[in-house]
Image (cartoon, rainbow, N blue to C red):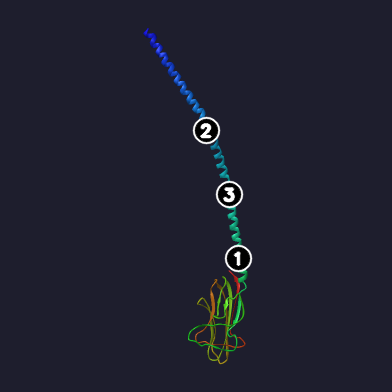
Amino acid sequence: MEIIVFFSLLLLVCSVHTNQTEADYEVLEQRISNQQPCLQDIHAVLRELTASLAEQKVKMAYLEKENQEIDDQLKEVERQKTEIDQLKLQSKVKQVAFSASQFDQGNGDTGPFNTQVTLVFKRVVTNIGNAYNPHTGIFTAPVRGVYHFEWHLYGYGDTRAGGVLFRNGEHIFIAYEHPTSAYVSASNGASLLLEAGDQVSVRLCADARIHDNQNHHTTFSGHLIFTM
């Protein structure tokens, strides 16, 4: 009798345990079933994001290429503008020439002095480009290039006539004539490579004297040969 009761109880326990396990499985299956649509949505969103990211990368690569092309075009435009500006400048500065005599009117002597003195040629007959200053007697190069200069000095009597061509304070050439009992003249010329801003002038030699009158014997001239 006891054995029968024991087996009856055992069967009852097993039945309860089996029912509980099946219930747990059903709950788990339900949860998984409920989560599957959510997981599918997440995967779909991830796929969309991946596709969108790939598309954005393609667009960025295209924009970078387009920006580079625009940058290259801007550089080319800037280069061409610089060349045009340089050509305009060269065309403008090629027109450089001047010629002047010492006195604007009347006649008179200059010197002698105990030191060199910059000669001012006041009567300007040509000053294309305005590189020569008739108030200081100084020519200022507007552009780098080769320039040619000539100076002619007229004197008389027992005092020598002479003048030195200077570039930025550097003695270049001299025109000189010893004194005689009659009129004398001294002339010279030089071609110089000048940088933009270089200054050229003629200085009267120390203890020298020159003369000028209405005939304009004493002159200073120069012009640009070519740019460099």
> Residue drawn at (58%, 46%), measured in percent from left and top?
59
- Res. 38 mark: 2
Q: Amino acid at mark 1?
A: Asp
Distance between the alpha carbons at the discs numbered 3 and 1 = 32 Å
Q: Quadrant of the C terminus?
A: bottom right
Q: For the point 61% across and 80% down, which residue is it?
A: 99
The residue pinned by badge 3 equals 63
**Relative side of 15 to 172, left or right:** left
Closer to the camera, 11 or 147? 11
Residue 85: which numbered mark, if any? 1
Position of 162 relative to 64 (above/below): below
Element under label 3? helix
Q: Can you tell which of label 3 and label 2 is closer to the viewer?
A: 2
Tag nearer the camera, 1 or 2: 2
Q: Quadrant of the N terminus?
A: top left
The location of residue 183, given as percent across then percent down, is 58, 90
CA separation in Å, label 3 and label 2: 37 Å
Q: Secondary structure at mark 1?
A: helix
Camera-nearest label, 3 or 1: 3
Location of residue 56 (image quadrant): top right
> x, y (%) of residue 92?
62, 70
SS at circle 2: helix
Mark 3: amino acid: Leu
